[in-house]
Amino acid sequence: MKISREQLRDNFIVKVEEISGEKISACYQCGKCSAGCPMAKEMEILPHQIIRYLHLGAKDKALNARTIWLCASCHSCSSRCPQSFDLSNMMEALRLITLRAGNLKLRPEEISAEFLKKAPQQAFISAFRKYSN
């Protein structure tokens, strides 16, 4: 019996690739995305390491990493990538998968009135787009 490449691929990877439009296997871990990421110093693991987790099948580690939430979607990574891999799209796909599973990261009722008075409206709206479904 012959097993196709598609049968060997994990459904989770297929889902990430469908949502992001990116081919996870295109990344060969050069690290240029992490080197140019303006948020890298705030992340517990670097952006290229998220992809490595996906390569290794450690989807829980990738989904539970704060890194996917700290990605600013500035596309610095994709502009530096020799493979034209858009890591920002892949990070957004991981956030969407998490949110669709019901794991909300921002709950409006938990935001203090004091913070709402001080926060710029654009930051507030942007946070809701990113952290809620």
Image (tube, grey):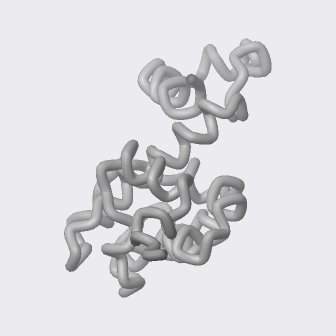
Instruction: Give the total of numbered labels.
Output: 0
* Residue furthest out toward the front: 1
The one nearer the camera, 113 or 45, is 45
The quarter of the picture where the C terminus appears is top right
Residue at screen point 55% across, 61% down: 10
Q: Position of residue 88 (x, y in %)?
A: 37, 54
Q: Position of residue 77 (x, y in %)?
A: 32, 66
Left or right: 35 as drawn, with respect to 64: left
Q: Nearer the viewer, residue 10 or 86?
A: 10
Does 68 appear above or below 103? below
Look at the image and tell me whether residue 46 can be seen.
no
Q: Is residue 53 visible?
A: yes
Give the vertical position of 23 relative to 114 (above or below).
below
Q: In the displayed structure, would residue 66 be above or below residue 31? A: above
Residue 98 in the figure: left or right of residue 129: right
Comparing 19 with 71, the one in front is 19
Q: Which residue shows up at 43% across the image and 49% down it? A: 72
| Residue 28 pos. (x, y %) | 37, 83
Splitting the image into 4 quarters, where does residue 46 fall? bottom right
Q: Residue at x 62, y 14 (%)?
A: 117
Name the residue at 73% across, 13% down: 113
Residue 66 point in image, percent of width and height: 66, 55
